[in-house]
């Protein structure tokens, strides 16, 4: 679900999160206030005849970094029948690119702009 206040993925406009192990998993919000408004419903969902102790695994915070593709190399047009490019690098048939991953700072927008 993605709307103005909640998203299933983090972004510069949705960097505040709650993790709910029994419900939605991670949910990302446009502001700390929107995140905090959701907490009561999430916490109450752990109350049945008594408290489910997994409620202690509900956490909230702010995303500062996300794992992103870096050093992306597109598949060359010419790859031989053994999967090797002209420079000798191997390319499996299903690969359209190669890359590394790194944790990169999330470009933060001011909260006022994100909430607008």
Image (cartoon, grey):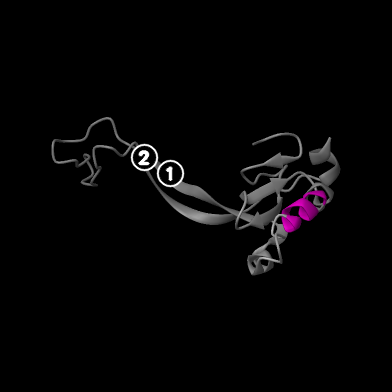
Report the residue marked by disc 1: 72
Q: Nearer the viewer, residue 50 or 92?
A: 50
In this picture, is 62 found above or below 109?
A: below
Local secondary structure at mark 1: strand
Q: Circles 2 and 1: CB distance less than 8 Å? A: yes
Q: Residue 2 appears at what percent x and percent y? A: 67, 35
In this picture, is 49 found above or below 109?
A: below
Q: Is residue 47 visible?
A: yes
Residue farthest to the top? 77
- The part of the chain drawn in magenta is 37-44
Q: Residue 28 appears at what percent x and percent y? A: 69, 47
Local secondary structure at mark 2: strand
Q: Reading the chain from its start, which is encountered first: label 2 or label 1? A: 1
At a point 64% along the width and 36% down the height, the residue shown is: 1
Q: Does residue 40 show up magenta in the picture?
A: yes
**Is the residue marked by circle 1 packed among few (<14), some (14-19), or many (20+) residues within 10 Å?**
few
In this picture, is 86 found above or below 25?
A: above
């Amino acid at each position: 679900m993605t709307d103005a206040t909640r998203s299933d993925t983090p972004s510069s406009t949705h960097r505040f999160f709650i993790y709910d192990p029994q419900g939605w998993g991670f949910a990302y919000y446009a502001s700390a206030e929107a995140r905090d408004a959701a907490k009561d419903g999430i916490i109450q969902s752990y109350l049945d005849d008594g408290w489910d102790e997994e409620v202690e695994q509900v956490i909230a915070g702010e995303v500062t970094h996300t794992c992103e593709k870096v050093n992306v190399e597109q598949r060359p047009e010419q790859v031989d029948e053994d999967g090797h490019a002209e420079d000798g690098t191997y390319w499996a048939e299903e690969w359209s690119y190669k890359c590394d991953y790194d944790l990169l700072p999330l470009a933060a927008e001011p909260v006022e702009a994100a909430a607008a």
